[in-house]
Amino acid sequence: MPRPVTAIVMLLLSSACAQDLVRSVHYEYRPIARGRGGGGGVGGVVPGVGLSVLSGVLLWWNEGRAVRESRMLHRLLPSLVRLDADSPPDPTHDGRLVHLSGPLRASGLVDPEWGLQRQGVLRLRRSAEVYQWREERTETSQRVSEREVRREVT
C-alpha cells in the first residue's frame, strides 16, 4: 500500500515544481465606505476646464512663435545668396545668408574606440542591445467580508 501513496505525493510535488510560480495570499483590512461622497461630478470638471484653458494658452504661444519665424524668413529672403555647389568659397559672402545645393562627398570616418574605418560615409551610428528577463505578475482581489479583502499575487 505505501507504493501508490508515494506515487501520488511525487506527482503532486512534480506538478507544483513544473509551474515554477510564487504565490502569496494575504488579507487586508479595507472596510467599505458608506455614506461618504467622493466629490461628485465636480471632481473631474475643474481639472478639465483648467486643462482646456492651458491648452488654449499653449496654442496661442505656439502660433505666435510660428508667425514671428515666418516674418523673419520673409525679411531675410532678399539678402539670400544662392551659390552653385562647384563654385569656390568667396570671402565677400562671409556673415551673409547662403543657400547651397549639390552632391555631398566625404573622405571617410574612423572610430578609434572600435578600430573601425569606413570610406565614403558621412556618419557612424552605434547601437547597443540589452536583453532582459520580463516578470509577469497577476493580482486578484476578492472581498471576503465587509472589513477584509483577500489579495492573491502570483
Image (tube, rainbow, N blue to C red):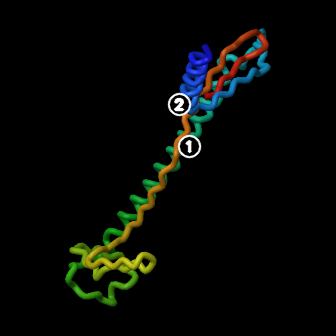
Inspect the image, locate mark 1, and give the three-letter code of the amino acid beneath it.
Val
Viewer-nearest residue: 7 or 53:
7
The reply to whether the C-beta atoms of the residues labelled 2 and 1 are less than 8 Å apart is no
Viewer-nearest residue: 132 or 39:
132
Residue drawn at 51 percent across, 45 percent down: 60
Q: Nearer the viewer, mark 2 or mark 1?
A: 2
Viewer-nearest residue: 7 or 153:
7
Q: Quadrant of residue 10?
A: top right
Residue at the far front in the pictured view: 1
> What is the distance, in whole Å, between disc 2 and disc 1 at their CAs?
59 Å
Q: Which residue is mark 1?
A: 57
Q: Which residue is mark 2?
A: 18
Name the spot of residue 17 as percent of width and height, x first. 57, 31
Inspect the image, locate mark 2, and give the three-letter code of the amino acid beneath it.
Ala
Residue drawn at 30 percent across, 77 percent down: 118
Name the spot of residue 142 as percent of width and height, x first. 66, 15
Name the spot of residue 130 as percent of width and height, x first. 48, 55
> What is the secondary structure assignment of the residue under circle 1?
helix
Residue drawn at 33 percent across, 84 percent down: 93
* Disc 2 residue crowd, few under 14, some 14–19, many 20+, Cα 10 Å: few
* Disc 1 residue crowd, few under 14, some 14–19, many 20+, Cα 10 Å: few
